[in-house]
Amino acid sequence: MYDPFVHASPGMGEPHTPSYWVDTAGLPPEDDSAVSGNLSADVVIIGGGYTGLSSALHLALEHGVKAVVLEANQSAWGCSGRNGSFSRISGGRVPLSKLIELHGEDVARQYFQEMKNGLDTVRGLIRDGAIACDVQPDGVYKVASKPEHVHALKREIALYNDVIGYPAKYVAENDVRRVHSGAEAFGAMHMPDGFAMHPLKLAWALHRMARSSGAVIHTSSPVIDWTSSSAGHKLVTPRGVVTARKVIVATNGYTSRELHPKTAGRVLPIHSQIIVTRPMSAQEKQDSLPGTDCMFDTRNLLFYYRRLPDDRILFGGRSAIHGRDAENPKHRESLHAALCRKFPALNGIQVDYNWGGWVAVGKSSLPFIYKVPDVKNVFSAGGYAGSGVSFSIQAGKRLAQMVCGGGNPTAVDFLHQVPQRFPFQHFLRVGQRVAYSWYRYKDARQ
């Protein structure tokens, strides 16, 4: 598997990783094939996932700019085509209490509003583009996986109610059973906004919308060399060269350290893995997930899961540390065992799909939308920490504003600060392994 810590490039024209999403997404969109010869553009976008496609679409719709997208493999080949399918009010991995402690109540409210704006942006695109991406009814549950987690969950709900002014509510154990049966549901926080959908259908629809609005999308076009001068940027691909005045880097967890020295080291790629079961019987559905809501639990190494429209269960969580270990069957087996612990009625259920990919965490565990320092007219966004379906699309919209001279497009200062580099790059995964061991110990003890 491609590992951004090891490999210089994610490949060239690689097919999508086999998954439930690929098998059910229908025909892929037409593109503009690989770059051939010499091209020029005002704006070039590196990366054809949610952030890059959204940037291209919003540049065309709102600013009249017809950008060129360079995607190494296929459109939405990375996390945009492999994720857990939750579009909700989210971004990064900092608890609300910590966010308030670090940045204050006013900034916390502003950031919450920007995350909500992201969800509204996705809703608007689905509505205006008549995107058929299997949207499910709204509803997000953070489920207390152990009784001792309930108190902290109630404190979090109070912050949402009293500080943010958002109607999160506590759902008692008996009432949770209406949407979540099984052995690990001792209460939950319910958020009324947020929905599940088919992430690859959404991404491919954004691709079609961007291209029909004038964007050019070159697949099989990895950037293998990048030089800059006062005149602009020269991006070399295996079959051609693209010169541009401005560049957007939208590669997030798939950012090679070789892409550009000014973007290197600002995210830690984290591998997340998903399994999908066979379709359940009516009784199995009743004894596991009778509802269709988005679910995630309160563990340090949390699990996220939902019932799919064809009554399968999608179940995901953190897995391998290194790309070379990603295909190890033990990670699939570990997820399967966790699913069966959570839902005893599904003990031994067949797993039909198993895949994984890289999410990206910044040093602050918060996302970023910023102008890259010490290089002219380069912008980037990322660090969504596995919670970025809606926020990555919103980040693409904000990048389009920045590229067109809009300055910082939100009042949330930390979003637009240059993300700090991770120190001791060569030892990061040693630290990650230690952290995972500690989190697993805490999850077992709590």
Image (spheres, rainbow, N blue to C red):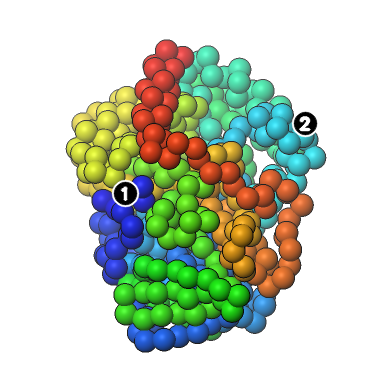
Q: Quadrant of residue 38?
A: bottom left
| Vertical side of 396 occupied by 188: above or below | above
Q: How many residues crowd mark 1 within 10 Å: few (<14), some (14–19), many (20+)? A: few
Q: Quadrant of residue 390?
A: bottom right
Q: What is the secondary structure assignment of the residue under circle 2? A: helix
Residue kind at label 1, given as amino acid type: Val
| Vertical side of 19 occupied by 188: above or below | above
Q: Position of residue 75 (x, y in %)?
A: 39, 68
Residue kind at label 2, given as amino acid type: Asp
The Cα atoms of the two marked residues, 1 and 2, are separated by 46 Å
In the image, 35 versus 282, the foreground residue is 35
Which of the numbered marks, if any, corresponds to residue 109?
A: none
In the image, 342 versus 101, the foreground residue is 101
Which of the numbered marks, if any, corresponds to residue 6?
A: 1
Say whether residue 388 is visible.
yes
In the image, 311 versus 295, the foreground residue is 295
Which of the numbered marks, if any, corresponds to residue 162?
A: 2
| Point 72% across, 60% down: residue | 409
| Point 60% across, 20% down: residue | 152
In the image, 353 versus 229, the foreground residue is 229
Q: Quadrant of residue 283?
A: top left
| Point 47% across, 27% down: residue | 300
Instruction: Report whether 305 appears left or right of 10.
Output: right
Q: Position of residue 235 (x, y in %)?
A: 44, 73
Q: Position of residue 413 (x, y in %)?
A: 73, 48
| Vertical side of 43 occupied by 378: above or below | above
Q: How many residues crowd mark 2 within 10 Å: few (<14), some (14–19), many (20+)? A: few
The mark closer to the camera, 1 or 2, is 1
| Point 36% across, 74% down: residue | 237
Q: Position of residue 145 (x, y in %)?
A: 46, 23
Instruction: Report whether 99 appears left or right of 76.
Output: right
